[in-house]
Every structure is written in C-alpha cells, then in structure tokens.
Image: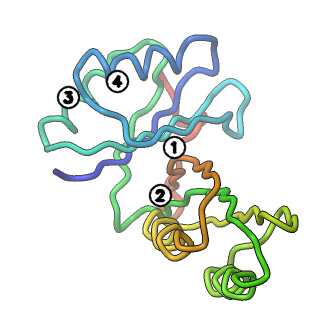
C-alpha cells in the first residue's frame, strides 16, 4: 500500500469539510491524517489528507473529489516534489533524574520546550512524519503523559501553487 497526500482547495463554507470526509467514508477509504485551514484568500480553505491505498484508490479519490461542487482543485502531492510538515505537542514526565536527557533530546531534534513545571515538560516539535515518530520513540522511556499531533501540511516545491487564482470551477 502506497501513502498518498492530497491537497484539496475548497470553498470556505459551512459543511464542506463534512462532505469531503464523508466521501472517504462512503467509499470505504480510511483517512490517516486530515488538516484544514483558510488559504491566502478567505473565500477558500485548503484540506490536506493523507491515506494509504493502491493506484485504484488514488484514482477513485481524485474522480470523486473532482465531482463535488465546493471542491475547486485536487492535487496529489508527489513525495519528491513536496515539502511536508507536522506539528507535535508532547507532554513528558519531568524529574531531576531524566531532565538533562530530555533537554538533550529537545536540542538534538531542534524542538523547544513551551511549558515547564517541576513534574512535566511540554515540548513542541515540527518536521516530517519520520522525525516526529523518531522523537516519540526516543522519549517514550521518560514517560509520555499526553500527545497532540496535527496531520500533514504540504506544499509543492517550486513556484506552482494550489490557490484561488487558479480555481476556476
């Protein structure tokens, strides 16, 4: 199974996200990650969805999304031509015995502590999914208290854009 990342430019209206995500459910496709936010134009939102599937699944998703009224553009983000990032907020147990090891991990992964208390550290880290996963594995022995992780956000490298100027639907 291949991992696909779709960038979908949609009208920024009530219910559009529900209709897009429901289409995946109706077709029996599982969404691994989903992020959505307003674009440079308040009229549009950009939905980024990652999923695992085969070429048939990929083709069906593109066809079904393209038929939807509020969907303006659909693009499959090719791995070698795309910058992807995730954000992780992670709360780790903090004590005097492990603090220096945790601080070293924070430094090596170029993350930062965003909240500090005598018994917990909240750490922010951004990067590719593999970096996020590696950080989680490294800090597991210290005691993970809580994790909050965004989905993937992605932009194509170079000057090509998925934006409202090219949305003609």
Which badge, 3 or 4, comes first in the chain's sequence? 3
Kindly report the distance in space between the C-alpha atoms of the residues bearing marks 1 and 4.
Answer: 15 Å
Q: Measuring from the top left, give residue 129's x and y in whole percent.
A: 46, 63
Q: Mark 2 points at which residue?
A: 156
Disc 3 and disc 1: Cα gap in Å? Answer: 20 Å
Tell me where residue 154 appears, x and y as whole percent.
51, 53
The image quarter in which residue 27 lies: top left
Q: Of the numbered discs in the image, which one, if any, rests on residue 162?
A: 1
Label 2 crowd (10 A; few <14 / some 14-19 / many >=20): some
In the picture of the structure, the residue carrying the numbered disc 3 is 60
Which numbered disc, 3 or 2, marks the residue closer to the eye?
3
> Do the residues bearing badges 3 and 2 touch, measured as CB atoms within 8 Å?
no
Q: Residue drawn at (56%, 57%), measured in percent from left and top?
A: 86
Please count the marks in the image: 4
Residue at position x 49%, y 16% from top? 18
Badge 2 element: strand
Gap in Å between the C-alphas at discs 3 and 4?
8 Å
- State the SS at label 1: loop
Crowd tier of the residue under label 4, counting other residues whose Cα lies within 10 Å: few below 14, some 14–19, many 20 or above: some
Q: How crowded is mark 1: few (under 14 residues within 10 Å), some or many (20 or more)?
A: some
Q: Do the residues labelled 2 and 1 touch (CB within 8 Å)?
A: yes
99 vs 17, left or right, is right
Q: Position of residue 112 (x, y in %)?
A: 76, 72
Is 56 positioned to the left or the right of 119 in the image?
Answer: left
The residue beneath circle 4 is 65
> At numbered mark 3, what does the secondary structure look like: helix, strand or loop?
helix
Q: Is label 2 in contact with label 4 (beta carbons under 8 Å)? A: no
* Viewer-closest of 129 and 135: 135
- SS label for mark 4: helix
Q: Nearer the viewer, residue 83 or 159?
A: 83
Q: How is the image coloured?
A: rainbow
């Amino acid at each position: 199974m291949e991992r696909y990342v779709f960038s979908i430019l949609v009208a920024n209206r009530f219910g559009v996200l529900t209709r897009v995500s429901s289409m995946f459910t109706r077709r029996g496709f599982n969404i691994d990650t989903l992020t959505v936010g307003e674009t440079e134009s308040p009229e549009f939102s950009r939905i980024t969805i990652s999923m695992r599937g085969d070429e048939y699944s990929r083709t069906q998703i593109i066809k079904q999304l393209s038929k939807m009224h509020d969907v303006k553009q659909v693009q499959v983000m090719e791995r070698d031509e795309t910058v992807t990032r995730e954000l992780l907020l992670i709360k780790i147990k903090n004590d005097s015995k492990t603090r220096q090891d945790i601080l070293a991990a924070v430094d090596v992964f170029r993350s930062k502590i965003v909240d500090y208390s005598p018994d917990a550290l909240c750490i922010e880290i951004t990067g590719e999914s593999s970096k996020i996963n590696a950080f989680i594995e490294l800090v597991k022995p210290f005691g993970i208290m809580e994790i909050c992780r965004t989905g993937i956000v992605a932009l194509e490298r170079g000057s090509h854009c998925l934006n409202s100027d090219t949305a003609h639907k």
